[in-house]
Image: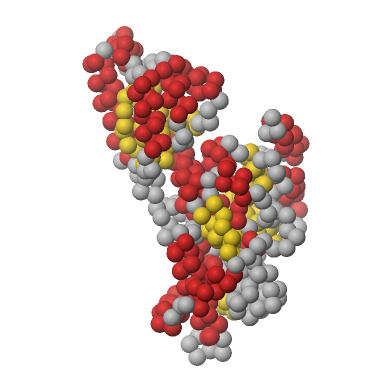
Amino acid sequence: MTNQHKKAVWFLTGSQSLYGQETLRQVERDSAEIVDGLNKTGVLPLPVANKAVLIDADGIVSTMRQANADDECIGVITWMHTFSPAKMWIKGLRELQVPLLHLHTQFNDRIPYATIDMDFMNLNQSAHGGREFGHVMSRLGLEREVVVGHWKDVRCQNEIADWMRAAVGRDELSTLRVARFGDNMRNVAVTEGDKVSAEETFGFTVRGYGVGDLVAHIDNVNEHEIDNLTGMYLDSYEVAPELAKRGSKHDALRYAARQELGLRSFLETGGYTAFTDTFEDLHGIDQLPGLAVQRLMADGYGFGAEGDWKTAALLRAMKVMAIGLPGGTSFMEDYTYDFTGENSKVLGAHMLEVCPSISAAKRASLEIHPLGIGGKSDPVRLVFDTTTGSAINVTVVDLGNRYRMVVNDVEVVKPEQKLPKLPVARALWRPQPNLAVAAAAWIYAGGAHHTVFSMALNATHLRILADMFGIEYLHIGERTAMEDFRKELRWNEVSYSR
């Protein structure tokens, strides 16, 4: 279901007819070699398609329109091999609707001191051709990513890969559909928002359904399907005795299987790749979905608790962006603090819904416990600790006049002691630069209490994604100083209010 993108990025080379046909043929050969080399690195998440050497305005406009119209093209890489007068790019750049990466490279890596002549200089003019191209994009106010370096350099390739993953996220957000079962948790501010402006800004749609629409799918699941899925649960997890085949709560496990099958049926039938629910609106459902939501997230679905459709959409996009990378991505919430000075930490969790893609255990523990809110039967859930290492927490909030993305770098650590009475999946992390600064900065920024937590992606991926949508981006990391961060907030308020 993760829908790995079988898409591509187009490679467009800039030149002109001034230098003659032989030079243009060499430009074509060099471009083909660069594209072939990039595709063979194994670093890039998507293939690069060598499309055209562009030498005049008509050809540029036509190519940009073709890129817009091709559903398989999710972005273009431009490279100026020779000097390519930028006035001829203006109309084409105004037409372009997919993300653009300006690769400021050259075919050769070294200056051939012993043999360099004017023929070589006329052919290899990327150094100033790229500056000409950059000038006109700045004058047009076009959002783009600039990567500088030799195309064989791993750093350069990794930066291209980061941009590609962001382009995948942009493409996913522009088309995904979120199913919202019930409304949001009553009186909560941050899970609200303007769905019309969200579709205008990002492209995704949010459609609301009564819980009864989902109940119809849950009730329609047959016993044979439940038998098969329940058997898979018993084989895949460390199962609490009461949930085992002859256990006192085995019927609850079967109902969890029914929920998962019903949810999958609803989402697949409607073409939804993200969804929300809320414990305050469960009429006709015996238990708040726990195991079902966790397993759907593990398969790539986006999810937001308490009706949080913005986080559901963001999680789905980040799941797709992270395909092929080590580490998982999950719905998350800062739950409680461990105040120990500079070593202070956050315990992240949720009532039920943390994705097992971030689990440290090979076989998570399948358990059933009371929930304490919602007034329903005890829900089944997977319980585990998160693997350790670097991660990010990400939120997108609606400020009324714009969207703001906030990203905090964190370091996930192993709990100092066991948590035998905490019956939920959880992660323990040190926020960067420390809890005092990170939490204050997050609060000043108006960040949500729900986040997308990822051990696969990094802040660069999200910064590029925010740039592609033209939304505000704030990064809280090891170098964040509160005075500077608050200045950035003030400057952004002026910049984005124009």
Residue drawn at 57 percent across, 76 percent down: 380
Residue drawn at 67 percent across, 61 percent down: 184
Q: Is residue 239 visible?
A: no
Identify the coloring.
Answer: secondary structure
Q: Relative to residue 438, is residue 93 drawn left or right?
A: left
Q: Is residue 274 visible?
A: yes
Residue 383 on image: x %, y %:
57, 71
Residue drawn at 63 percent across, 38 percent down: 472
- Image height of 462 relative to 341, above or below: above
Residue 298 on image: x %, y %:
49, 63
The residue nearer to you, when weighing 249 against 402, is: 402
The residue nearer to you, when weighing 427 against 258, is: 258
The residue nearer to you, when weighing 82 against 340, is: 82
Quarter residue 423 falls in: bottom right
Residue 425 on image: x %, y %:
59, 67
- Image height of 71 relative to 115, above or below: below
Residue 118 on image: x %, y %:
31, 8
Q: How many marks?
A: 0
Residue drawn at 53 percent across, 77 percent down: 256
- Image height of 169 relative to 181, above or below: above
Image quarter of the C terminus:
top right
Image quarter of the N terminus:
bottom left
Quarter residue 449 falls in: bottom right
